[in-house]
Image (cartoon, rainbow, N blue to C red):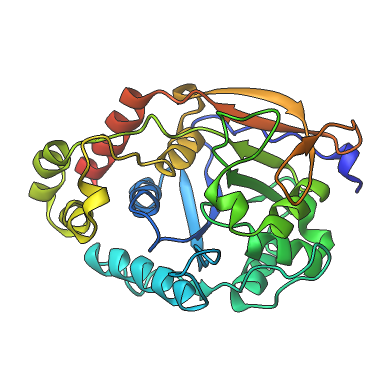
Amino acid sequence: MKPDTREVPEVPPPGCRLRVLIDTDAANEIDDLFAIALALCSPDRFAVEGFVATHFGHQGEEGGPHTIRRSYDAIRELLTAGGLDSRYRIEMGGDPMPYLTVPVESPGARFIIERARAGSAEDPLWVVALGAASNVASALLLDPSIAPRIRLVFHARSEWSWPHRSEQFNVAGDIPAARRILLSPVPLVWFDTGTQLTCSMSVTESRLRPLGGMGAFLHDYRFRNPSFQSENKGFFDLGDIAWLMDPSVAESEVVEVPHMDFLMRFRFRGDLGRMRRVHSIRREPVWELFFRRMQAA
């Protein structure tokens, strides 16, 4: 399979259940936890096969390998709050890739390979990467044969600079890995939106805290960081899961896959095939979907 023959992902229609693995820097922001909660509360749509905890912020003073453990612990906290602690597998991901062609071994990368091999091109594993692309890129290097068995949703959110640059934390978190997934033949969704998904403290207090369990945990988690309490706080990653449930919540287009250099500049050469780029998500239907699922759960 060559990059220029890669399949463009199509979201299956309602009634089809997707095998999903979520790769997440859950302790970095609050939005990952909301996205995970929506997936967990939608068993009719998702067969959640597990989670991989990834690093964040390696380019800053707060970053380092310990952020992988922090993400692992945040996922575990959420599952415990929902009474799901022993139901789902969580694996630790690896560090950022040192080179474009050198994978990083980790239990998380091997977990992605294992679950991809358990499916097929007709029954693929949807890997939703809500953080740096380190683990899925490493998995694709360790076992290139899994590419047609995966549909990769990578939360890039660089809408303000497309098609010239990719200026976003998840891309910057591991530039070699982001370059690798563009160069690989994996069917790719470049999720390029989410800033619009804001929600005030008063709304989560009135609609989540009374639910107890996972709902109360999500609201109370906002008190852990002053930025989480902002009236304009964005819940970016929530959009990826909402879109997989109902593609009508956002607009998407099929675009040429670009090459990307180490300065995150795009170059379109026409030799990497095409991908789906999701953009312009709508705030209200995403939040109504989220709160409806939380209430039902």
**Most foreground residue, 191 or 88:** 191
Residue 247 at x, y percent in the picture: 51, 27
**Most foreground residue, 163 or 263:** 263
Evaluate whether residue 272 shows in this view: yes
Residue beneath the point at 64% across and 30% down: 277
197 shown above or below 170: above
Image-based side of 186 in relation to 135, left or right: right
Residue 117 at x, y percent in the picture: 72, 64
Evaluate whether residue 15 shows in this view: no
Residue beneath the point at 60% across and 44% down: 153
Residue 288 at x, y percent in the picture: 28, 29
Residue 261 at x, y percent in the picture: 78, 47
**Most foreground residue, 193 or 244:** 193
Q: State the count of labels.
A: 0
153 shown above or below 282: below
Image-based side of 209 in relation to 156, left or right: left
Residue beneath the point at 48% across and 22% down: 248
95 shown above or below 281: below
Quadrant of res 200: top left
Residue beneath the point at 91% across and 46% down: 2
Quadrant of res 136: bottom right
